[in-house]
Amino acid sequence: MKRFITTFSALLLAFTAVEGRAQLTATYDDISIPMSDGEFLEADVYIPSGVTSGEVILIQTPYNKEWFAWSLPMGVGMDLDAQPFIWVIVDWRGFYGSAGADVSDVDRGQDAYDVCDWIVAQAWHDERIGTWGPSALGGVQYQLIDKHHPNHVCAVPLVATGHQDYDSYFYGGVLEEARLYQLDALGYGLSPFILANHYDGPLWNFSAAASWYASEIDIPTLQIGGWYDHNIDKMIEFYESSRNDADPSVTDEQWLLVGPWVHGGTGSAYVGSADQGELTYPNAEFVSDTMAWEFLEYYLIDAPNGWNLTDKITYYEMGGNDEWWTSNEDNFEAVGTSVLYLTASEKLTSLDGAGSSSFVSDPSNPSPTIGGATLSDDLEQGPYDQNSLDARTDVITFSTAELNDEVSISGRVSLNLYISSDQPDCDIAVRLVDVYPDGRSMLITDGIQRMRFRSGDYTETGEEMMEDGVVYDVTIDLPFTNYSWLPGHKIKIYVSGNNASRFNVNLQDGGAMYESGTGNVANITVHHNEDHPSQIILPGENPTLSFKEPEAAGQLAVFPNPVRNELTISGPVKSDQSYELFDLRGKLLSKGQLNGNTLHTNQLESGMYMLRIMDENNHSSTVHFIKN
């Protein structure tokens, strides 16, 4: 069967390709469904030939129900009769066919409940209703779940979360501007409210509490997300809560699928396609369709397909071998962490750095967004090569040498940076990439933090401007991801003052946010030395996190680093030289004469240590290493 394309833009491509061909004929076209407030929503109903009474898949859309006349989802395409379900496609109140039913205070959950009541009353309906849909079509499913309709028995929300709080629009205190304007273009009209509430506070707290539906879930769900979707962090958090806080009868009937997919809606990539940005994932193609179909068949028509034996979480490991993994836990975040330090000469190493690195941030010429978890007609989505940023003077980079072993992470990467600036405010934008042996720097994930909110308090009283010359500690959190760097690849980060036009550009003058102006040019410094150990923290223990550092001639070096049992020392060292070993607090742990160029470390506890080597003239060299 022809595979369904799940996003509006992809539907548009399909429409263009088949323009002039016959549409799928609705059994009931443009029918009016009565709402409890006396208004009507417009819907289309598709019933397979020969089906006199069947189960329903309900789709509620703000993007025009007419698009589904060109292709039904999950592989059905135009072949309605090859599957058993009745499809009910409804335009949201205030959109397209239901535009005339618009009211100032819309309760979409109640509208969905009324639609379900209408479906149940139809002679062609049997008993059960399932729901499906991506993005806004997914969020409205949670609002229906919150109403507990007795015939709503299962739901498949894709790249969606019902949760709406401050973080939904302001990442690290920075407005995700391009996505907001895209939502305005789609007819949501959210900008006036969002921009009027650019600080966290009571209104956002109310919205967050009213839209956290995990404890209201009383039906099975299959939640489908993508690593390049802007909702992924909230989806991971919400899924874990649904496994613990949903009605006890269904806590073990919540499933999560996460693939290497974008949100969709713009561009040619979508949930379930193989091509994502500049990379291709053939073994991820159509997996979302297949699993959704099995889930719906199991719960709507009791298909004996063994869905109940499916592991609770199925997730795609990007990089590495590009393969699927499963888990029956409520979270698949890796245990432990690994640390890399920012150093001079644009390096990421396991040793403390020295010195500092500076760049200029000019609001009139911001560093551009290149792919990522975007949602805008003007921006690409997904993994894209970031190499063009290397030529910019407003971006600094830090990279490991080529990795000797695979490095795997699962969870949220964070950066603890020490920042100073000659302006009262600035943003710190970070992009995490995989440097391929052919030189490409493919984006994995990115994040941003506004320095005036560096304390993590996003209320108006939480603002604190910067003073010229003062060094501030700030944490930049990146979204949850699952990734493996292969041997021969490099881990690399880009650090800049902006990521435009995805995120709002900081004027850096310390004035009111989101107002027009030219702004100030900021000189920003990242400090990375013993007193200011700027670092990137990777989720997951990687005892083999090691790489070949191009050491200068005569420079003391140790490997492997981190080490397990035996440390090899190279550089200006002789086998009869003496050594001293210290912990990070400066406590002398041992001393003596070197036995060859090795030092046994199996007796040490996990942690960081300093090794000092001394010659006969009492000249010394020191190096840090990590014991795993």
Image: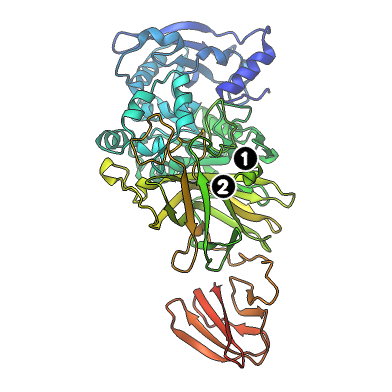
Q: Is residue 470 above or below residue 561?
A: above
Which amino acid lies under the numbered mark 1 shown in the image of this protein? Pro
| Badge 1 density bin: few <14, some 14–19, many ≥20, Cα 10 Å | many
Which amino acid lies under the numbered mark 2 shown in the image of this protein? Val
Q: Is residue 126 visible?
A: yes
Q: Is residue 15 above or below residue 477?
A: above
Q: Quadrant of the N terminus?
A: top right
Q: Position of residue 498 (x, y in %)?
A: 50, 41
Q: Position of residue 520 (x, y in %)?
A: 43, 40
Q: Position of residue 30 (x, y in %)?
A: 48, 6
**Disc 1 secondary structure class:** loop
Would you say the residues marked 1 and 2 are in contact, meaning their CB atoms lie under 8 Å apart? no
Q: Position of residue 598 (x, y in %)?
A: 65, 84
**Disc 2 secondary structure class:** strand
The residue closer to the viewer here, 492 or 275, is 492
Name the quadrant containing residue 572.
bottom right
Q: Which residue is mark 2?
A: 395
Q: Nearer the viewer, mark 1 or mark 2?
A: 2
Q: Which residue is mark 1?
A: 383
* Residue lying farthest to the right in this orientation: 438
